[in-house]
Image: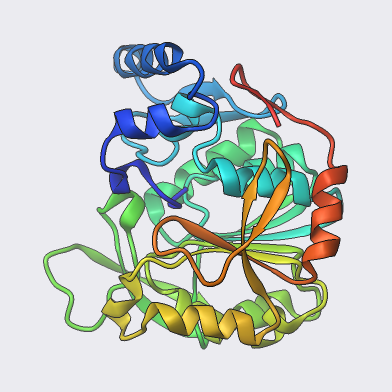
Amino acid sequence: MRLSSLSRLRSVPTFLSQHPFNREQPGRALWTFAKWQLGSRLVPGPVLVPFVAGTRLAVSPSMSGATGNVYAGLHDFEEMGFLLHLLRPGDRFADVGANVGSYTVLAAGVCGAEVLAFEPGLEALRWLRTNIAINDLGSKVRVLPLAVGRERGEVSFTVSLDTVNHVAPAGESGNDFRTVGVETLDAVMGENAPTLIKMDIEGFESEALAGATATLRSERLAAVIVEINGSGLRYGHADLEIHELLVGAGLSPHGYDPKTRVLLELSSYRREGNTIYLRRPAEVAERLRAAPRVQVAAFGSI
């Protein structure tokens, strides 16, 4: 998963000490980190680690995002907690930029939702399918090895940048590329819009959302989780474009505390991390409060 990856944090110790599951037990957090750093390198290949409510993830030290789940239970505490409290069996979830599948496993394996997982990166795609298989989620997840954009076509996509592989803007050099197909969210979703969209595609969000006009305005869509961090400038898009597009579709920016299950209305998008955009916040708040508690490996429950 790419959202707020550890490579974007100032340091792993900062992430460990500030994570809500670790604040009261910093010693445990450092021990977990040290144990993983040593133990994972003694095992040939990925390690199957406990995740949420009996699910598992295949994780290797090179997965800079997924290792956050090892260190702290939920790498993206706020956003993953929101997903776990929002989705129900029969809901639909669009994981746009699924990476190795952390969000996909939570949505399908814990919540019982139907998932469409978009991931064009070859290495991430391989681990995404592995994590679907080890959790026996093939009947709930449809994998689409595609990029998402404003129109159907093809783009160049980087292949060797781990969690920050991305659609190559015009003129980018210095990386290896491959050609991948592009589809629009509207074409894939049709009239069956998802309950929740998570989108983290390294600045290509404006292009993807431009091809999701009908999906974004659908009354079926309750929320969008999106990272707005300035990377869209490489494609000629300012952050404000994404915010205005989502607000224009009837969605408003919020934060969420999974421990108290309280939504926080925001005046604008967050410049760091992710913003949750909601339709009908009062209805969403009620659904969040009514969700059953879930156990996050050995870290606690929310």
Instruction: Name the side, left or right, on which 283 lies relative to 141.
Output: right
Residue occupying the point 67% across, 48% down: 82
Q: Is residue 297 above or below residue 261?
A: above
Residue occupying the point 17% across, 63% down: 175
Instruction: Name the side, left or right, on which 11 lies relative to 278.
Output: left
Instruction: Name the side, left or right, on which 49 lies relative to 92.
Output: left
The quadrant the C terminus occupies is top right
**Residue 228, horizontal then vertical, whole percent:** 43, 68
**Residue 255, horizontal then vertical, whole percent:** 60, 56
Residue occupying the point 44% across, 30% down: 59
From the viewer's side, name the closer residue of 33 and 147: 33
Q: Is residue 36 above or below residue 235?
A: above
Instruction: Name the side, left or right, on which 245 lies relative to 195.
Output: left
**Residue 161, horizontal then vertical, whole percent:** 26, 53
**Residue 131, horizontal then vertical, whole percent:** 57, 37
What's the coloring here? rainbow
- Residue 107 appears in the picture as rendered: no
From the viewer's side, name the closer residue of 30 and 134: 30
Residue at the outermost left position? 174
Q: Is residue 144 above or below residue 86?
A: below
From the viewer's side, name the closer residue of 299 and 259: 259
Q: Report how many numbered discs are placed on residues in the image.
A: 0
* Image quadrant in which you'd find residue 43: top left
Q: Is residue 150 above or below residue 222?
A: below
- Residue 169 appears in the picture as rendered: yes
